[in-house]
Image (tube, rainbow, N blue to C red):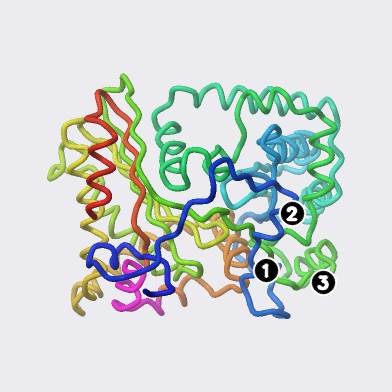
Amino acid sequence: MSGQACTHAQVRRGRPCRRPRPGPPGRRAWPGALALAAVLLAAPGARAQRTLVLAEPHGTAVALTVDLNAGGIWDPTPQAGVSRLAAEALLEGARPALTRLGASAHVDCGQFGLRFTMLAPPSTWRAAAELLLDAVFHPRVEEGAFESARMRLLRSLSFQAGDPAAEIRTAAFEAFFGAGHRWARGPCGQEETIRAVTVEDARTAAALRFTPARATAALTGAFVRQDAADLLERSFAGERLPLLLPLPEPPPLPGSREIESPAITTWLAVVFPLPREPDDEATRFLAARMLQALRPSPERPEVVDAAVEVERFGGGGALVTFVAAEPRRARVWAERVRALVDSAAAEPLDAPAFRLALRRYRGARLLALETPEARALDAADRLYFDHAFQPPDARIAGLTAERLRSAASALGPPAIAILGPAPAGSASLERNLRQH
């Protein structure tokens, strides 16, 4: 039997492979033990690029993105979301000074960790960037800012309660990791845990995890390149080792999840595991082609909405497909999503079809990167996950039909989640999943 984990293509074709085994019941992976499950995504002793400066002399703004390996799985279960709350409190404290400089900042969270993004005018970018980096890497969580951030975060979480778009995302990762898996919980916290954490909890989390050793950063925009490089170099103080990203332990064992909801539309999620070291740009190309075949159109009147996302985290990540459709047709669309991957994995596109697809993808991809904050985010993410940066034009130019096929073939068997009225029963979905 092969020593390689099963891919979606191997399962469909009946080829032998090794399926991951679930861990023993009740097994827990606590943050203190996560270093044992972390992977150094580079050769031992390798040096990695942690910061990047992209000078754009004719730009009209400056953007800074900091990706931080904190929050999510690193938070103890009773304090889920404490790192995100600490990050929000730090921005709450810095916001008045940033506003006076004409700058704005926000924080995002996910399975990957935390991401800070700042946008500032060229005349004040240096002061704004220094302010944000100091707030993140020398955290001082003030009680007033902490309580204001808590109230804002609780309002946001309460708005998500009962939102089918939020519920299907949670169900998708419960199906992907397993309902009792630590990685299946919401990475940004729940109302009950956010209410329970204290300002001291937030200070402890920030002091432990908000450090340059756990981060990457990128600056883009209208500035003198050397000035920006010096600023980041001072903040990161020569950090060059690749990041240690935590791995899901036990590994994902994709299954199914069905939730009955009074919604008039059925929401469907199909989640494909990525390999340990995915071909990021080819996977995004595949996602774009899948979205083109799934999104609402006169040819697909039963589809209300669709999205295809590439989520990166330790161990590779996932390609996540969401479809909102007329309830009686939802399971048909689950099959169509899998058929799209099967077709892409079967054989490369012919040359004319590939050229047309690549031209469409290049236009959409570069349009998505038209703002300085989008380019800073892309650069910081590439350093965070891949430890090096290549310009988007070069990444797109290097795509081939065979790389697209290989990206589809490398996907693992999917997890499926369905949320909608009167489901037919999870047993039938499980049986259908095993057959594929």
Q: Residue at x 59, y 52 (%)?
A: 112
Mark seen at residue 234: none
Question: In the image as oriented, which residue stretches furthest toward the left?
Answer: 299
Front-most of 73 and 385?
A: 73
Image coordinates of residue 131 in percent, x first then y, are 81, 48
Measure how far apart labels 2 and 3 are at the Cα level. Answer: 22 Å
- Mark 3 vs 1: CB contact within 8 A: no
Q: Which mark is residue 238?
A: 3
Q: Quadrant of residue 145?
A: top right
Q: Which residues are magenta?
A: 397-409
Which residue type does callout 3 highlight?
Gly
Judge whether residue 82 is colored magenta: no
Q: Residues within 10 Å of mark 1 (few under 14, many from 20)?
A: many
Number of callouts: 3
Q: Residue 422 falls in which quadrant of the image?
A: top left
The residue positioned 27% from the left and 70% from the top of the image is 15
Foreground residue among 360 and 227: 360
Amino acid at pointer 2: Trp
The residue that label 2 is drawn on is: 125
Labels 1, 2: front one: 1
| Residue drawn at x 18%, y 77% as measured from the top left | 350
Q: Which residue is mark 1?
A: 52
Identify residue type, mark 1. Leu
Identity of the residue furthest to the top in this view: 262
Q: Label 2 neighbourhood size at 10 Å, few (<14), some (14-19), many (20+)?
A: many
Position above or below: 133 against 431: below
Element at label 3: loop
Callout 2–callout 3 Cβ contact below 8 Å: no
Taking depth in this image into account, of 218 and 405 the one nearest to the observer is 405
